[in-house]
Amino acid sequence: MSNIDNTNLIEFVRNYLSSIGIVADTLSDYFEATHFDRALILNLSPVCLMPKNKPATSSSNQTHIHVTGLPRYFFFTKDEVDSNASSSNDKKLIVDVSLANLKALNKKSTEISLDDLEIKQSFTLSKIAHRQNQENQVQISKIKLDDSLFINLRLGLYTNDLLIFLGYRNSTRLLAIGIPKEYYLPIASIGTSVFFNLNDKVNIKIKTALKKIETSYDNNEVIADIEVIDDSIYQQQLVEAEPTETTHAPMPKAGKSSSTNEHPKRNAARGKEAVKDCHYLCGLDCSHLTFLSRTGLPYIEAHHLIPMAKEDDFENSLDVKANILPLCPNCHAKIHFGTPEEVFHMIELLYEERKELLALSGIGIDLETLKQYYS
């Protein structure tokens, strides 16, 4: 990671907190972009440190942290900052801190206990400072009035350490994380910056994703096919998967998915191999156009000709190369949602191509039974 931006900042924070001992489940549940919508990174200069942490060469008596330029608008609106003809009153900011983060920064112990995983509420003060003949700046922290937890956070920060504020979505509340330079300098070049639209591209747990889907819809709404949700997750996993080599020999069943206890498991790496073997071309018509995925490879979806939901009807696994066909997104959607005439025509073409390989994989099926599965 050489640059930090709005797509990987949350991942960067998660990785740091993981490095000091916070367990993965806690991080994945709490630190994701759907929890936060904005962020400010402050790369601390000597003048912005607590007095005892300033280098010996510093002659500054300043005790607050000053913020200039675009990052000023993280704490106040642009109109508020730019239009103030005098300094504003102090504004109380509710700021959460991680006890584990405080413990690591202040080097009190290398062991992180369950109690340290707590996020505790603290606060600091902020104001708009008017300056003659210069742009207004924002000042954070009054060390005699701030909450002790926020002061302890500042006491663990030195020159070029990072103080990161994450803004909770639809709230003025913030989470403050301190990251020492010893952690980030070997992996990234980071300066003071602000992001107003966080977009975390890191994978999240399937159960978390499904919960978000569940809460987005009314309980009385219905869908025609639960397999569509299952397949959407599988296709996303397929993009990132590394192909694994297999033969056309019969394979034992992998069991049911732990997330649903209903659907047979599918191996995305095996699906990727089937797609790769067909050179990332549509199995119905190699002239069909698609696009490049974020991995730089053509985006092709994997379709199980005999639906995985029917695996109980067979002795061997259906998640094998012979049963996995690469389809362009349009053909894949058509085979799921097209008219019966279109779907049956596609099935006839694909079955004729794959019936011998299916037999080698210990899967016997006739065309009429396959059509019934799609009815």
Image: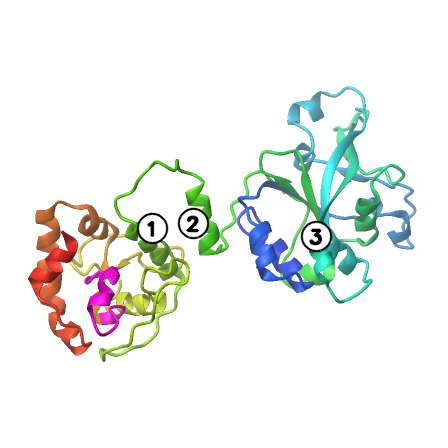
Q: Amino acid at mark 2?
A: Leu
Q: Which residue is mark 1?
A: 229
Total labels: the figure holds 3
Q: Amino acid at mark 1?
A: Ile
Q: Decide if residue 296 is in sight here.
A: no
Instruction: State how far apart marks 3 and 2 are (Cα).
Output: 26 Å
Left or right: 308, with 188 as reference point: left
Q: Determine the image quadrant of residue 250.
A: bottom left
Q: Is residue 192 magenta?
A: no
Instruction: State how far apart marks 1 and 2 are (Cα).
Output: 9 Å
The magenta stretch is: 303-321
Left or right: 303, with 244 as reference point: left
Q: Secondary structure at mark 3?
A: loop
Q: Are marks 1 and 2 in contact (CB under 8 Å)?
A: yes
Residue at image coords 12%, 61%: 370
Q: Which residue is mark 2?
A: 210
Relative depth, front residue between 135 and 228: 228
Residue 80, how many percent across, how many down?
69, 23
Relative depth, front residue between 279 and 326: 326
> Which label belongs to residue 118?
3
